[in-house]
Amino acid sequence: MRRERSGEVKAFASLFHGRQDAFGLMQGEKIMAVRRPVTLLHYRLHLEGKLRLGIYPLLPGGMTHFLALDFDGSLAEESAFEAFTCTLHFGLPLAWEISKSRGVHLWLFFSAPVSARAARRVARMLLEEAGVQAEIFPKQDALPEGGLGNFIWLPLSGGSVRQGRTLFVDPTHLLPHPDQRKYLSTIEKISPEKLAQLVDLNGLKEDETVHHRTEKTRIFSGDLLPCAKRMLEGVEEGCRDMAAFRLAIHLKSRGYSIEETERLLQEGNATKNRPPLAARVISAKVRSAYLRGYSGYGCEDPLIIPFCEESCPIKQKMLTALYVAEENP
Ligand code: SF4
C-alpha cells in the first residue's frame, strides 16, 4: 500500500473540502454518518485504501466549495459527455471521474466558498442546456434543521483505484491521467465572481416565475437583446435551428406565451429564413425552449457570435467582469 505524503494529503483535503464536523464512512457493508471532526488522517487513510471517506459538501450558511454532478446507469458516459461539452461553452473547467459504480462524477471547484443555491442553479441550467439528468451535490440549497444534507464519496478510493475506478480521466479518450496527484494539482477553480456572473447573465437569480410576465409588463421587440433582433430579420442555413431555439428563449424571457412565440417564429421562418425550416422543426424548438425551463441566451455559442453586438447590456456586463478579473487576478 502506498504511504501518502503529507503535502499530497493536504492538497487533496483542501480540494475536497466540505463540512468539518461530520463525515460519511463505509464500514464493512454499512454506510455511516459520523458526527465527529474530519481530519487529515481520515483523508490519508482514504487515499491509502484503509477506509472509504464521504464528505458533506453543504456548509453551515448554505455555502459550498465544490459542485459535483453524478451520472449513473447505462447512459452515464453519454450524458456526462453532453454536460461536459455544454460546460465548455460556459468556460467551466470540469474534472471527470469514473465513479466506483462505473458511472461518472463531474466536479467543479470554487476558489472560495459560494452559495450552494447559486451553484445548484447553474448546475440545473447546464443539465437543462445539455438535455440530460444527473444528481447534483450539494443536494440541498440550505441545511435542514439539525441535518447535514447528503455526503458524496471521495475519489481515489484505495482498492477501487486498482480496478480503474474513482480515477480522473482525460474526457477526450476516457483514459486515466497517468499521475492522479499531479493532475489534481492542475485543476482550475472558478471564482465566486465568475459564478455570480453566470447566475446574472443567465437570469438565474429569479424563480422560474420570471417567465410569466403579464401582458401589461411586456415590452415588444424593442425590449429584445441585439442578437435576437438580428435573428428575427432572418437567418441562413446552418444557423436556423440555433436561432429558432434562442429566439424562443428570448421571447419566453420577455413574457411571450408559447402560442405567441410559435406564431412569431413560424411567420418569421416562412418569410425571412433562407430557406425556411420545416414548420414542425420550429414547433419542436419552441416546445423544447418552454417545456424544459431553458433560460440562457447562449452568448458563448460560436453560432451566435455573428449576431452579437458590443452594445448589448449583457456583453457590457461580461466585458466589465472580465476587466475586473484582469485587474484583480
Ligand atoms: S451578449 Fe451578444 S449573444 Fe449575448 S445576449 Fe447580448 S447580443 Fe446576444
Image (spheres, rainbow, N blue to C red):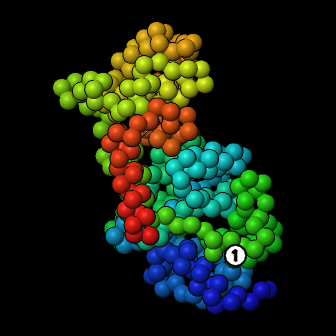
Q: Is residue 277 left or right of residue 271?
A: right
Does residue 281 lie above or below 68 as drawn?
above
Q: Splitting the image into 4 quarters, where does residue 195 fall? A: bottom left
Q: Is residue 254 visible?
A: yes
Residue at 44% across, 14% down = 268
Q: How many marks?
A: 1
Residue placed most toward the observer, 48 or 294: 294
Residue type, mark 1 in image: Lys
Q: Splitting the image into 4 quarters, where does residue 259 fall? A: top left
Q: Is residue 203 visible?
A: no
Does residue 209 lie above or below 52 as drawn?
above
Residue placed most toward the observer, 64 or 24: 64
Measured as percent of width and height from the top left, residue 312 is found at 35, 39
Residue placed most toward the observer, 266 or 98: 266
Residue under label 1, please give it.
Answer: 182
Measured as percent of width and height from the top left, residue 92 is found at 54, 56
